[in-house]
Image (cartoon, grey):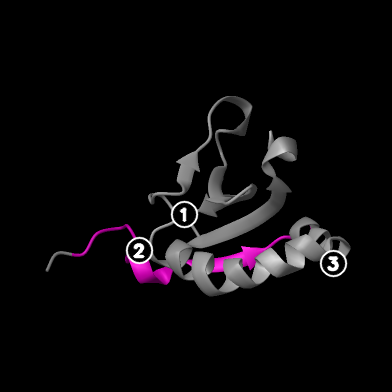
Amino acid sequence: MPTGTTPSSSNYRIAETDTFRKQLNKNRDYQRIYRKIRDYVYPLLRENPFFGPNIKHLRGDLSEFYRYRIGDYRLFYTIDMDTVIVFVVRLDHRKDAY
């Protein structure tokens, strides 16, 4: 099997920004949703952070970000291909997200 410069799909690591962690501490709804993120969303992002039924690559000024839809909430993240890390940036209710 040929090897390329693209890392295998199981190599993505998850890193949470300080902003994201502070959001979780301030809002009880976010803490409840975080369990879903940790148990369901993170494993999916580790496999393939670029494509999925709830993943959308944003456009315009936000083109460096991806969005994962979790019900009425949106999880925003960016991907660093050099270090193979998914940086989780924010979690917002959809009415406040954009």
Is residue 16 in view from this perspective? yes
Look at the picture and state if 12 lies above or below 57: below
Residue type, numbered disc 1: Met
Check the picture and name the quadrant holding the C terminus. Answer: top right
Residue depicted at 39% across the width and 49% down the height:
53
**Closer to the eye: label 1 or 3:** 3
| Magenta-colored stretch includes residue 73 | no
Q: Which residue is mark 2?
A: 7
Which of 20/12 is in front? 20
Mark 2: give few (<14), some (14-19) or many (20+) Cα within 10 Å: few
Q: Secondary structure at mark 2?
A: loop
Check the picture and name the quadrant holding the N terminus. Answer: bottom left
Q: Earlier in the sequence, mark 2 or mark 3?
A: 2
Q: Residue furthest left?
A: 1
Q: Magenta stretch? A: 3-18
Q: Residue furthest right?
A: 26
Circle number at residue 25: 3
**Closer to the eye: label 2 or 3:** 3
Residue type, numbered disc 3: Asn
Q: Say whether residue 40 is left or right of residue 11.
A: right
Residue depicted at 63% across the width and 47% down the height:
72
Residue depicted at 84% across the width and 66% down the height:
25
Q: Position of residue 81 (x, y in %)?
A: 46, 54
Look at the picture and state if 65 lies above or below 25: above
Which of 32/2 is in front? 32
Mark 2 to mark 1 CA distance (whole Å)? 8 Å
Q: Say whether residue 87 is left or right of residue 30.
A: left
Circle number at residue 81: 1
Q: Earlier in the sequence, mark 1 or mark 3?
A: 3
Which quadrant holds residue 29? Answer: bottom right
| Magenta-colored stretch includes residue 7 | yes
